[in-house]
Image (cartoon, helix red, strand yellow):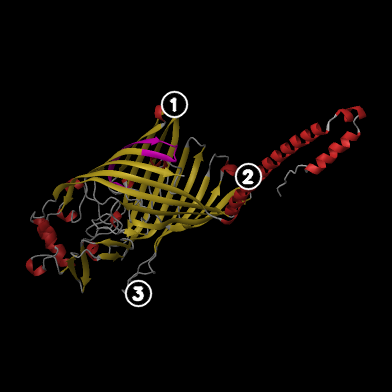
């Protein structure tokens, strides 16, 4: 209830004055003229009127303010979701050097009938024998080399962050995202052999796929205590992109929970987290058990009702993420993941350059001259995958600030089970990091390091990063924000330098940077086929373009609040 102050009315005041005159000495009353008393009463009345007007104005003003407060309280009580926005516009200049591609005469063999000396309509045995004969005679041509430049390409990316809290135990979090190239909203790309050329569940909101808002994240978090141990359970579309240590180059808070060195991928699943700091005495100690589904085989696919009689299992992943130590300045974070029954692809959309089909043991090739969109489906479970990564983050104090640095070492292991039954991969004898029918376990390794230096005079940040991946390095980072391809998936080396200039803190900043990709082996980020040293590739290794080196320069402006 709001209280109002009221002034005495004029009659009451006059009555009070009259009462006062009763107590005045008679001499004074006689000497007081009636006109003087009248003037005093009139003056007093004017003052009272002014005060009443002033009080009326203040009351109306307070009423208006209280109405506004009431509306805010009503909005807070009825609107259960708080929104945040992250918008980035970016310009890039990308330059590819020494792209390798099979000569057109070699490509044409796939569309030439067997009777005319080509591969079209051949059996697997006929194809492999023909290739062996060409190799024995030294007639397999070398790939052609060429450069490609995209002098400028612009993108817009918007992320709408959602948070809602029911009480201290229950929360909802989510993110809607749209990411598009200027002048394109098709959402489907021409497939040139990269996993990023396919629009699928793992990258739909993280790479440019048009102006459609997509659900990148949506999950609930239930929190409670088990004795002295706090725990939380969460399920939904996971916060599995932009994990540590990408927060340095993104100039943001930590964006996801898996280490980005091994997993940067949209997926659905659940997690169970335990806070262990109080029971162990180790600062920041925690343990998280994670589960995810990478592929659902019995929904919407040709094999769902056994139409093709194919036996294809779902792809399940189980992992752990543990903060081993974190005192706010130095931290050690470990992650391990295992995936069962990795498939030879994912359900998605792309424009294929040609279509390969298998009928009665023969393989036919047909050019997609009409640019038709294909719905791609995996056809084979090709093996299991393991990965582990250890990340160290710390600071070096300076006179007025500090230098941030990080170092991550990672390992992957592939255990192939069979050759892909996809007609093209089957013809080439490809399996999980395997070719020519060979099925061998492979171990891959990666190093990722960086340092971010303060620029005190302008409050800027200068970052230097380097990563390296070995021949058999393979991670699931297909959702990494890159028009070239995940740098952390590279089988080779990537160098990056960037400068971040805050304008309004991290709410509005610009970023200028450059990257140099120096690939050493084919197939970065692709689970199929044995990697080949790029310098040793032949026309058969370069049916799709193989990238050797890339220079990328970029400038972006980001608004977030």
Asked if residue 74 is positioned above or below residue 4 in the image, the reply reads: below
Residue 527 at x, y percent in the picture: 30, 55
Start and end of the magenta stretch? 489-510
Asked if residue 210 is positioned above or below residue 126 in the image, the reply reads: above
Between marks 3 and 1 in the image, the one whose residue lies nearer the viewer:
1
Instruction: Residue 222: say if magenta.
Output: no
Instruction: Please tell me which of labels 3 and 1 falls first in the chain.
Output: 3
Distance from Cα at disc 3 to Cα at disc 2: 73 Å
Instruction: Please tell me which of labels 2 and 1 falls first in the chain.
Output: 2
Q: Residues within 10 Å of mark 1 (few under 14, many from 20)?
A: few
Between marks 3 and 2 in the image, the one whose residue lies nearer the viewer:
2
For the residue pair 399 and 66, the one nearer the viewer reads as 66
Q: Are marks 3 and 1 in contact (CB under 8 Å)?
A: no
Can you identify the residue that label 2 sits on?
A: 61
**For residue 115, which quarter of the picture?**
bottom left
Can you identify the residue that label 3 sits on?
A: 306
Can you identify the residue that label 1 sits on?
A: 398
Distance from Cα at disc 3 to Cα at disc 1: 65 Å
Q: Residues within 10 Å of mark 2 (few under 14, many from 20)?
A: few
Number of numbered tags placed on the structure image: 3
Please, what is the dominant secondary structure of the magenta stretch?
A: strand
Asked if residue 71 is positioned above or below residue 49 in the image, the reply reads: below
Asked if residue 185 is positioned above or below residue 283 in the image, the reply reads: below
**For residue 493, which quarter of the picture?**
top left
Residue 419 at x, y percent in the picture: 27, 62
């Amino acid at each position: 209830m709001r209280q109002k102050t009221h002034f005495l009315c004029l009659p009451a005041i006059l009555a009070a004055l009259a009462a006062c005159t009763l107590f005045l000495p008679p001499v004074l009353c006689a000497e007081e003229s009636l006109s003087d008393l009248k003037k005093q009463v009139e003056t007093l009345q004017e003052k009272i009127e002014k005060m009443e007007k002033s009080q009326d104005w203040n009351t109306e003003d307070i009423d208006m303010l209280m109405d506004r407060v009431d509306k805010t309280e009503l909005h807070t009580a009825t609107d259960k979701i708080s929104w945040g926005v992250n918008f980035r516009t970016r310009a890039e200049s990308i330059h590819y050097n020494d792209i390798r591609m099979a000569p057109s005469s070699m490509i044409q063999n796939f569309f030439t009938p067997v009777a005319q000396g080509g591969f079209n309509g051949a059996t697997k045995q006929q194809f492999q024998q023909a290739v062996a004969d060409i190799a024995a005679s030294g007639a397999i041509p070398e790939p052609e080399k060429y450069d490609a430049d995209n002098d400028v390409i612009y993108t817009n990316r918007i992320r709408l962050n959602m948070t809602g809290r029911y009480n201290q135990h229950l929360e909802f979090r989510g993110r809607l995202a749209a990411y598009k190239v200027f002048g394109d909203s098709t959402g489907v790309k021409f497939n040139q052999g990269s996993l990023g050329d396919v629009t699928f569940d793992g990258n739909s909101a993280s790479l440019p796929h048009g102006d459609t808002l997509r659900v990148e994240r949506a999950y609930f978090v239930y929190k409670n205590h088990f004795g002295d141990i706090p725990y939380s359970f969460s399920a939904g579309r996971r916060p599995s992109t932009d994990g540590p240590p990408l927060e340095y180059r993104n100039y943001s808070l930590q964006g996801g929970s898996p280490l980005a060195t091994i997993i940067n991928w949209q997926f659905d699943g659940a997690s169970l987290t335990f806070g262990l700091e109080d029971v162990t005495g180790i600062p920041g100690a925690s343990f998280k058990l994670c589960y995810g589904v990478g592929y659902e085989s019995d929904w919407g696919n040709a094999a769902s009702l056994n139409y093709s009689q194919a036996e294809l299992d779902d792809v399940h992943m189980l992992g752990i993420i543990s903060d081993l130590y974190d005192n706010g300045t130095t931290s050690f974070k470990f992650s391990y993941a295992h995936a069962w029954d990795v498939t030879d692809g994912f359900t998605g959309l792309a424009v294929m350059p040609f279509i390969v089909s298998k009928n009665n043991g023969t393989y036919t090739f047909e050019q997609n001259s009409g640019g038709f969109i294909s719905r791609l489906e995996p056809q084979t479970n090709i093996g299991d995958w393991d990965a582990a990564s250890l990340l160290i983050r710390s600071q070096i104090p300076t006179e007025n600030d500090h230098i941030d640095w990080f170092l991550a070492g990672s390992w992957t292991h592939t255990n192939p089970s069979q050759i892909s039954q996809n007609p093209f991969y089957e013809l080439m004898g490809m399996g999980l990091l395997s070719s020519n029918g060979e099925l061998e376990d492979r171990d891959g390794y990666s190093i990722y390091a960086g340092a971010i230096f303060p620029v005190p005079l302008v409050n800027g940040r200068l970052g230097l990063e380097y990563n390296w991946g070995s021949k058999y390095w393979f991670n699931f980072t297909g959702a990494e924000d890159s028009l070239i391809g995940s740098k952390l998936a590279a089988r080779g080396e990537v160098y990056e330098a960037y400068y971040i200039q805050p304008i309004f803190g991290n709410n509005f900043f610009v970023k200028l940077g450059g990257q140099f990709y120096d690939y050493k082996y084919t197939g970065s980020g692709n689970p199929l086929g044995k990697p080949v040293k790029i310098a040793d590739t032949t026309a058969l290794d370069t049916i799709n373009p193989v990238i050797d080196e890339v220079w990328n320069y970029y400038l972006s402006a980001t608004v977030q609040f």
